């Protein structure tokens, strides 16, 4: 396939106020197009060709219930919008080719579920639970639980039975992944994968019961602007962390001036380090705790502001120790939030 042409840049002055539907976004001619073709080849090699998903741009990843249409976030269709999303939200679901494929495999799990109405089958319910179970956005996962596979970050399989199945399918369909070896010591997760393999083998010769490809909030219908989209996504910190000054002091006072430092050696400002750590913290804290990146971003920025106001710093040769200590603090706070619903008791 020939190289994709470089996309035209948006005019910054018009970007924020223009309705998203008028930005002219499509899958064709973007980096998404060859990735989708690669994914379709994966499905062909897995002999999953009777269900043909429809791909379209929308506000987020997803598959509308009882359809075979896969929504891809519109901001992945243009590098300027991807960079803008990373700046405003702090985390991009589909930051490169491998990550986009990871999400496509997950969404295809939903497609297979809805195409064949698997959620109605007794064994599916036995393995994963009832699809009518309430869908809770702020789910509280049990990190490292061996009852679920690991695919998307944040222990996503634990969110809902439908997500558990989609994650199980995604692990099963991932090329080159030996799920038997990976999950051999995890009997519950392995049983779900074995069910997935048996079921898909049975479905290869059957046409889908449902081929509805109706779209939900297609990019061409989104009337609001980027300013409205990101304004609605804001997540204020509130009063939940007022009381962390002591923790910051405990970190940086232990890493402060050392014996033998000359008077002209200045302390490194702690807030500068915290701001540099932000991108990696958002991704890794989400992966291992399930604490959403947008919340971690607000928390980290609050801590950076407090560190500056408290004039916290560290000796230049202690940066590694400062990085480990601060990362541990944020991870501990994130775990508190995921398990208790608040950062502090």
Image (tube, grey):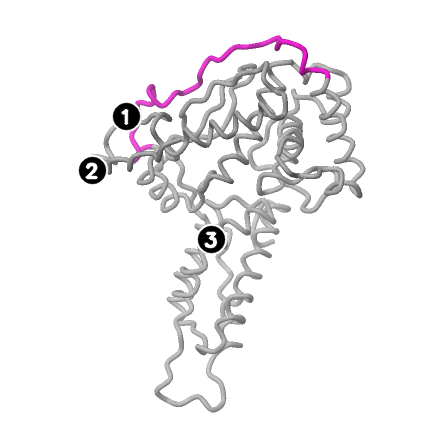
Q: Position of residue 86 (x, y in %)?
A: 39, 44
Q: Quadrant of residue 8?
A: top left
Instruction: Say whether marks 1 and 3 touch (CB < 8 Å).
Output: no
Q: Quadrant of residue 31?
A: top left
Task: State the residue at coordinates (73%, 31%).
Answer: 193
Badge 2 element:
loop
Q: Position of residue 89 (x, y in %)?
A: 41, 43
Q: Which mark is residue 11?
A: 2
Q: Residues within 10 Å of mark 3 (few under 14, many from 20)?
A: many
**Residue ID for mark 3:** 299
Q: Residues within 10 Å of mark 2 (few under 14, many from 20)?
A: few
Dominant secondary structure of the residues highlighted in magenta in the image: loop
**Residue ID for mark 1:** 24
Q: Position of residue 260 (x, y in %)?
A: 47, 91
Q: Residues within 10 Å of mark 1 (few under 14, many from 20)?
A: few
Task: State the residue at coordinates (55%, 67%).
Answer: 325
Residue 227 belongs to magenta span:
yes
Task: State the residue at coordinates (24%, 29%).
Answer: 18
Viewer-proximal residue among 45 and 91: 45
Which portion, as a residue range, is magenta?
202-228
Quarter of the figure that contains the N terminus: top left
Q: Is residue 85 left or right of residue 23?
A: right
Task: State the residue at coordinates (61%, 37%).
Answer: 156
């Amino acid at each position: 396939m020939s190289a994709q042409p470089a996309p035209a840049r948006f005019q910054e002055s018009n970007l924020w106020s223009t309705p998203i539907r008028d930005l002219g976004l499509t899958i064709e001619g973007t980096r998404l197009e060859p990735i989708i073709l690669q994914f379709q080849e994966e499905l062909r090699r897995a002999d999953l060709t009777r269900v043909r998903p429809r791909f379209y741009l929308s506000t987020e990843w997803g598959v509308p219930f009882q359809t075979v249409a896969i929504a891809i976030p519109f901001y992945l269709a243009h590098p300027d919008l991807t960079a803008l999303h990373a700046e405003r939200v702090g985390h991009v679901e589909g930051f490169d080719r491998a990550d986009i494929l990871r999400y496509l495999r997950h969404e295809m799990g939903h497609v297979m579920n809805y195409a064949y109405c698997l959620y109605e089958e007794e064994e599916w319910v036995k393995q994963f639970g009832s699809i009518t179970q309430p869908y809770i956005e702020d789910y509280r996962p049990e990190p490292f639980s061996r009852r679920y596979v690991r695919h998307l970050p944040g222990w996503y399989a634990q969110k809902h039975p439908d997500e558990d199945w989609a994650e199980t399918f995604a692990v099963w369909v991932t090329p080159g992944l030996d799920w038997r070896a990976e999950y051999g010591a995890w009997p519950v997760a392995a049983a779900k994968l074995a069910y997935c393999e048996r079921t898909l083998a049975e479905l290869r010769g059957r046409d889908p019961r449902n081929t509805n490809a109706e779209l939900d909030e297609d990019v061409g219908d989104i009337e609001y602007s980027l300013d409205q989209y990101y304004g609605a996504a804001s997540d204020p910190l509130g009063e939940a962390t007022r009381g962390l000054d002591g923790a910051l002091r405990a970190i940086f006072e232990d890493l402060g001036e050392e014996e033998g430092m000359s008077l002209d050696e200045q302390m490194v400002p702690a807030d500068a380090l915290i701001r540099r750590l932000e991108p990696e913290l958002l991704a890794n804290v989400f992966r291992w705790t399930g604490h959403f990146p947008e919340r971690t971003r607000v928390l980290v920025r609050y801590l950076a502001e407090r560190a500056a106001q408290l004039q916290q710093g560290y000796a230049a040769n202690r940066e590694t120790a400062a990085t480990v200590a601060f990362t541990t603090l944020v991870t501990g706070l994130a775990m508190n939030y995921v398990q208790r619903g608040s950062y502090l008791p």
